[in-house]
Amino acid sequence: MKFLDLAKVYIRSGSGGAGSVSFRREKFIEYGGPDGGDGGRGGDVVVEAVDGLNTLIDFRYQQHFFAKNGQHGMGQNRTGKSGADILLKVPVGTEVLDEDEETVIADLTEVGERVTIAKGGNGGFGNLHFKTSTNQAPRRANAGQPGVERTIWLRLKLIADAGLLGLPNAGKSTFLAATSNARPKIADYPFTTLHPNLGVVGIDGTEFVVADIPGLIQGASEGKGIGDRFLGHVERCAVLLHLVDGTSETLAEDYQTIIDEIGNYRLLSEKPRITALNKIDALDDEERAEARRVLEEASGGRVYLVSGVSGEGIQPLLRALRAEIDHARKAAEPEDEAPWQP
């Protein structure tokens, strides 16, 4: 299935039906009076987060969604049928944006969460509503309210516990394949990964979700390369795993390039990060020690040594990720209020 994380959609809610002007006409009933019914209500446009979807590809082939109009009112005090709502099913983690692509209308982060983004118009009153003591035979009725027509954007941000960051060919896809059942494309050239990949990683009887984000380059925040298009997918992550290619001759510069780019992107600079020196299977003991020293000086913290190919150092790194995820999720939970006492 092709990955699509941004879609432009045109929606319109249903218009309300018009009220009816009608009078009761039956044999032997001389003064029947008005009996015009009300118009039916127009349908709403509703967006719902559902399970089992991980892309917005359905909205590439259909961009227009129109709810049904309400039926007009009829004689004998019959109310028109309400128009059917239209439901847009989206993956969990989808944001609904206004036409300016900045104003967030709704953020659907749980299965079953739904929001009405365009309400249908109310039906018009029939002439029965306008009967008074001084106007026994009103000959007027209201037209139904028009529906709402607007353009929205759907933007998907994957729900993951940890996000993989690094320059192209840092070994992110290899790491994801070695630690989960995900099978991303792996090759020895830059920008192998063109779309984010998700993998479920298990450690010590627990599981968490890892997102492999396409490689960043210097100037990505300004639109170079793939740009910062996919950085939104790590906004919801609890921790970032920064992989650095251990075979590179410019370890400190490689590390700082990614730090500078995520520093230009909101909500990422303050997230906890774990730094790992990857591809250590290609280094001897002396080269490992020197690379670790250089990277620790650049990062100012602990550096894990791992290899996605041989599996060396994978378990300690996953346990560190699990601990950071648990800590971040616990800190994000609202504190329980003390029980009320008289």
Image (cartoon, grey):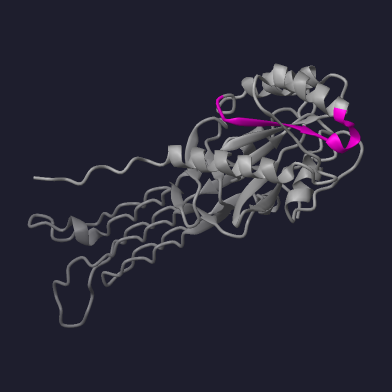
Q: Position of residue 304 (x, y in %)?
A: 71, 33
Q: Name the quadrant of the C terminus.
A: top left
Q: Residue 87 in the image: x percent, y percent? A: 52, 57
Q: Nearer the viewer, residue 307 or 115?
A: 307
- In depth, the one of 116 and 202 nearer the eye is 202
Q: Residue sitting at 31 percent across and 44 percent down?
A: 336
Q: Residue 41: percent from the left, percent from the top?
A: 37, 58
Residue 237 magenta-highlighted: no
Magenta-span inclusion, residue 272: yes
Which quadrant holds residue 25?
bottom left
In this picture, is 272 found above or below 142?
Answer: above
Residue 178 in the figure: left or right of residue 99: right
Determine the residue positioned at 39% across, 54% down: 16
Residue 40 image-quadrant placement: bottom left
Q: Nearer the viewer, residue 248 or 142?
A: 248
State whether residue 285 is above or below residue 155.
above
Q: Residue furthest bottom?
A: 28
Vertical arrangement, residue 101 with respect to residue 130, above or below: above
Q: Is residue 20 above or below residue 219?
A: below
Of residue 314 and residue 136, the one placed in the foreground of this image is 314
Residue located at (62% from left, 54% from top): 204
Q: Give the range drawn in magenta.
A: 270-285
State the residue at coordinates (85%, 45%): 309
Residue 233 visible? The answer is: yes
Q: Locate the N terminus and report the quarter of the image it occupies.
A: bottom right
- Is 235 positioned to the left or the right of 284 in the image? left
